Image (cartoon, helix red, strand yellow):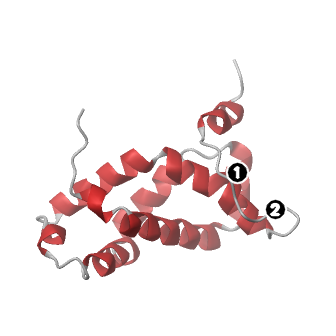
């Protein structure tokens, strides 16, 4: 059986990035080679977790004007620390050991990137938050 890290990397989608390794900082390389593929792979789960968050807060999100929803998303991921940590854990759980060791040395910076990327992803897919996943 292949090592866990190898298997995890195989299931991640390949994402073409603009930056090459020579031009990128280590953190940007980590973002492009690890975080972006994990977020893309986890997209359906991330959307459903957010739908559950909305339901937990009495569906207030759905009552907002379309222009208010991006702010709600931003606030929910930055102010609610329990939810924020759940979302970060959903990403970290798919790190290889090597990726986790890199993360552990820069967790604060990487957590900010994860949250920023999630905010952007949810804002770009607001129309999908209204749809339930059919199981």
- Residue contact at pointers 1 and 2, CB within 8 angstroms: no
Kindly identify the residue that appears in the image at 11 percent across and 65 percent down. Answer: 58
Left or right: residue 87 versus residue 130 is: right
Q: Quadrant of residue 53?
A: bottom left
Disc 2 is placed on an element classified as: loop
Q: Which residue is mark 1?
A: 99
Of residues 30 and 68, which is closer to you in this image? 68
Q: Which residue is mark 2?
A: 20
Q: From this viewpoint, which residue is outermost toward the top?
A: 1
Q: Quadrant of residue 114?
A: bottom right
Q: Earlier in the sequence, mark 1 or mark 2?
A: 2
Kindly identify the residue that appears in the image at 35 percent across and 78 percent down. Answer: 79
Kindly identify the residue that appears in the image at 51 percent across and 50 percent down. Answer: 40
Disc 1 is placed on an element classified as: helix
Q: Tag 1: Cα neighbours inside 10 Å, few (<14), some, or many (≥20)?
A: some
Q: Is residue 50 above or below residue 23?
A: above
- Structural distance between the alpha carbons of marks 1 and 2: 19 Å
Of residues 113 and 89, which is closer to you in this image? 113
Give the total of numbered labels. 2
Image quarter where the C terminus lies is top left
In percent of width and height, residue 81 lies at 38, 70
Q: Is residue 10 visible?
A: yes
In percent of width and height, residue 75 lies at 34, 79
Kindly identify the residue that appears in the image at 70 percent across and 59 percent down. Answer: 17
């Amino acid at each position: 059986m292949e090592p866990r890290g190898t298997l995890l990397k195989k299931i991640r989608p390949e994402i073409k990035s603009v930056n090459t390794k020579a031009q990128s900082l280590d953190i940007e390389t980590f973002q492009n080679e690890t975080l972006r593929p994990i977020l893309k792979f986890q997209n359906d789960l991330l959307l459903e977790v957010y739908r559950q968050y909305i339901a937990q807060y009495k569906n207030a999100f759905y009552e907002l004007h379309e222009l208010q929803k991006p702010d709600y998303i931003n606030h929910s991921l930055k102010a609610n620390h329990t939810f924020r940590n759940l979302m970060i854990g959903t990403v970290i759980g798919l790190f290889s050991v090597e990726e986790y060791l890199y993360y552990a040395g820069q967790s604060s910076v990487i957590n900010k990137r994860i949250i920023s990327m999630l905010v952007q992803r949810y804002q770009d897919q607001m129309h999908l938050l209204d749809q339930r996943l059919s199981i």
